[in-house]
Image (cartoon, grey):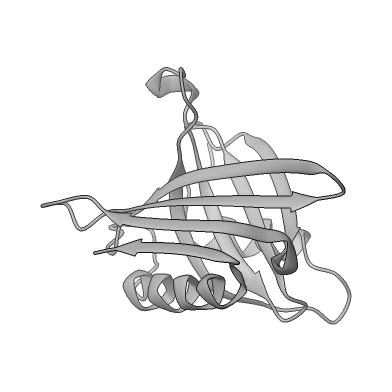
Amino acid sequence: MRKLDRNLMHAALTALLEPKEQYQFPVYVGFSERYLSSLEQTYGFLAVTTHERLLVSRFSLLTIPMKQQAFALQTLQKLSVRQIPLLKTRKITMQFQSTGKVESLRCFCSPKTFGMGLPNQEMQLQQLLETLNLWSTRSDFTE
């Protein structure tokens, strides 16, 4: 069984890249879908790219690839970031709209990850959120 770590993150995000594109500010997140049991929750990675896209790579708890997506940052309509008290975890909700279709993402990101080989998670998260905020037509940040 593979491990959700820096190596898997690099492989998953690299697979989503276009030619001559690079990813920036990768972070580990847990995705939240309503009405799912804890065994059905997905985990994975987010990163923005030099071609102004958001890469989303999801895995099951057993590291089975679930969903790989890329969104143009120009289609980011709404961004909401809330800090969960006491945990320092951030709840990030994004809404993308293109060609009449609306897609929402909700994830949770902790500033620290242990045993994953991602020592710069907190700094990467801050830079990712700043980049997303620049592109969002509506932002709501609550610390």
37 vs 22: above or below: above
Side of 28 where 58 appears, left or right: right
Q: Nearer the viewer, residue 12 or 100?
A: 100
Please give the name of the residue rendered at 73% of the width and 58% of the height, measured from the top-left corner: 71
Please give the name of the residue rendered at 55% of the width and 52% of the height, measured from the top-left corner: 94
134 vs 84: above or below: below
114 vs 133: above or below: above
Q: Toward which corner of the image does residue 127 lie, by quadrant?
A: bottom left
Q: How many marks do you count on the picture?
A: 0
Residue 51: x percent and y percent? 78, 78
Q: Nearer the viewer, residue 42 or 36?
A: 36
Residue 5: x percent and y percent? 47, 56
In the displayed orientation, state which residue is furthest to the front. 138
Please give the name of the residue rendered at 56% of the width and 59% of the height, measured from the top-left corner: 46
Q: Toward which corner of the image does residue 126 lie, by quadrant?
A: bottom left
Residue 48: x percent and y percent? 63, 71
Q: Quadrant of the C terminus?
A: bottom left
Please give the name of the residue rendered at 31% of the width and 59% of the height, measured from the top-left corner: 113
Residue 133: x percent and y percent? 51, 72
Side of 18 where 118 appears, left or right: left
Q: Nearer the viewer, residue 125 or 105?
A: 105
Side of 44 where 97 appears, left or right: right
Side of 58 where 84 appears, left or right: left
